[in-house]
Each structure stands twice: as C-alpha cells, then as structure tokens.
Image: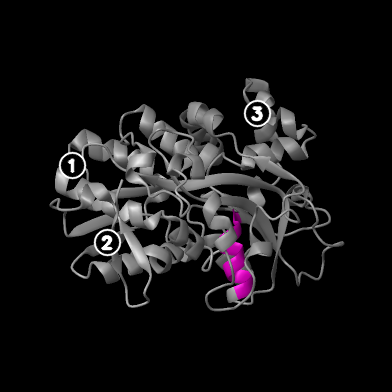
Amino acid sequence: MKLKTVLLSTGAALAIAPAAIAQEMADSMTLVSWGGAYQASQVNAYASPYQAMHPDVEITWDESSPEAVAKLRAQNEAGNIAWDLVDVVAADAMRLCDEGLAMEVDHDEILAPAPDGTPASDDFGDLIVSDCYIPQIVYSTTLAYRNDVEDWTGTPDTVCALFDTENFPGTRTLERRPINNLEWALYCDGVAKEDIYDVLETEEGQDRAFAKLDTIKDQTIWWSAAAEPPQLLADGEAVLGSSYNGRWFSAIEEQDQPISMLWDMQVFDLDGWIIPAGLPEDRLARVKDFVYFATDTQRLADQAKWISYGPARESSAPLVSTHAELGIEMGPHMPTDPENAANTLLYNYEWWADYRDDLDAKFQAWLAQ
C-alpha cells in the first residue's frame, strides 16, 4: 500500500492515512481526554503537529474521559454522538465495544505500519486487547507521599503504608472508584498478588476489601480528576495518596514539589482511543486521518518527551529519549523500567470489564454510608 507523504518545515516526512486521501473530511474534531499533564502531552506530541499540517482544522478538547462510558451511553440514547475520538482505559474500551458504542477497527488498515514495515497489529501486539481499541500508552497507578512529614516513623516503602496510620498518620487521597483500591486493600490484608482477582470475585472477598478500606475511609479525600492528588499533596491537605505515575512525575520533576513516589505494587494499565460508533462519514474520515498520524511510531515516542508513560508500540520504545524541557532521560521514569517494575500488579482488563458496573454501584453505596 503506497502512502502519500508531506514535508513539514523540519524536513520530516509524515504519512497520511490512505483512506483519507481525496475524501471529504470534517474541519473540526472533539477529542475527549483526561486533562492535566497527560492531555498536554497529547497536545504537544500530536495534536499541535497535526494542526500545523492542517491549519484549517479546529480541535476541541473535552476532559470527560473519567465518565466516558456513561456519557457515551447517554449520547447514544439521545441519538446525538457529540464526540469524535475518546481516550479511555482498556476495560472501558471493552465495555463500549461490547455494547456497540465503539467502532470495531482493522488496526492494519487505519494505523501506520512501523518504519521497517511491520504491520501495526504486530507492532502493538498483545496491547490490542479489543477489536475497538487503539492503544497509546502503558501507565501505572502508584502511591506518592509528602517527603517532609516530621511525625512519621520511617519512610513509606510499600503500598501498605496506605493502611499504616500508626506509623504514617495523616489524610490520604484515593480515587473515587473501586479499581486499584480494592486490589490494594486485599493485598495489604494478606491476599497473595496472584490470588487477588479470584478472591475479589466472591462476595466474601469484596466484603473483606471494603472492610480494609473502612480502616482509612474517614481519613481519605476521594478524588475524581487525576490532577487533584498532586495538588492536594503539594498544598499539604493530604500526605499520602494515589494517582497516575505521569502526574506524580510532573509534580516531582517539573514542579519540584516535596513529593516522592512509590513504585511498589504499581498497577499497570493501558490507555488509548476508541472511535464512537455511528459517526457521519466526513467526521469519521477526519478522525481516521488524525489517528493514523497520532499513533505512528514517532508520535508515540514523542509523547514520552512530555510525560513518563511508555509508548504502546514496540517500535517507539528505542526512540524514547529526553524530556522536551528538562533534558533528563525519560527511560528511568517509565513504569516499565526494570528498576521500577520489581513488584507490579497487572490490571485485569477483562475481569473489570465484566464486574465494573456492579462494583461501581457497590463502591458508591459504601462511600455514602
């Protein structure tokens, strides 16, 4: 398949999606993401370069990814799909795909091959966990803590410091959802890592996890946006909490906050795009053109210049270099770095796709008690 290319002022040749050539395309897109440092990395790595190639295209960002499933369901029921491309975690992509709200894609058709010609499906490999999913990055949810707390006994070195209020007193901050919180609760209650999801599948296991969370419930600020916990720690409103490793990287390395991060029991997860089902042809053509560009080998490597998330393409990894502004090597800050991955939990996408709705309801009811 021949690719049409264009030359930017930098001299770099950029592939254009073959399906988008000579096809009428919309002149605007609404992209849905998470806000904060992650969305900024998307803007810097591929949205702005794309607009440099297409100055007449307007891109609007919506920071609704945390509520993407519920909002896409509502848009579908109303018969008005307002979004063109939606950034979601893998388990949410599976749910949206199963419900027919996300479009199934041929990855080798809509995504660029690797520079050596390797098809996209092989380059992304096992990270393509759904027929509707276009992976972008590997990230992790981790704990971080204020490193200047004077009344602590020692320094947190495991995830279970979260539940150790005797040695590490103070306000915690955790995400307002069951994912990760239930896994950590069981692990810190003595469940072996390899048994967590088997235990969590039972009513008794769920009750056990909630009982463990009960021990810190009244000392916890529950967050919805990942930008909140770094700010809470920076302001001293919380001393220990969870967020995405890239958010902590930004607070620690870019903002020089008195915060340290724990890699222990980091929870690996995937983030990527889904295309809403039922888009008009001109909007779909624009989205395909953008996705072909935004997920190529160089663009995903470029994103790692702005945030410490590992690119989902195998061919991108060797191209990860230094931070675009700080000049520091980004490799040691990636969740996949061997030094950081000594004790990790691989998020079970399929399990959460099956149990998410039920446990979401149970978790929200528990919070309200």
Q: Which mark is residue 197?
A: 3
Q: Residues within 10 Å of mark 2 (few under 14, many from 20)?
A: few
Q: Residue 63's image quarter?
A: bottom left
Vertical placement of 53 versus 289: above or below?
below
Query: Residue drawn 67% across and 22% down?
Result: 204
> Callout 1: helix, strand or loop?
loop
Q: Residue 182's image quarter?
A: top right
> Callout 2: helix, strand or loop?
strand
For disc 1, the marked residue is 80
List x then y, in percent, for residue 116. 48, 52
Q: CA distance from mark 2 to mark 1?
A: 17 Å
Q: Residues within 10 Å of mark 3 (few under 14, many from 20)?
A: some
Residues in magenta, as a range: 243-253
Q: CA distance from mark 3 to mark 2?
A: 38 Å
Which residue is situated farthest in the left direction here?
Answer: 24
Nearest the viewer among 148 and 93 is 93
Query: Residue drawn 19% across and 49% down?
Result: 283
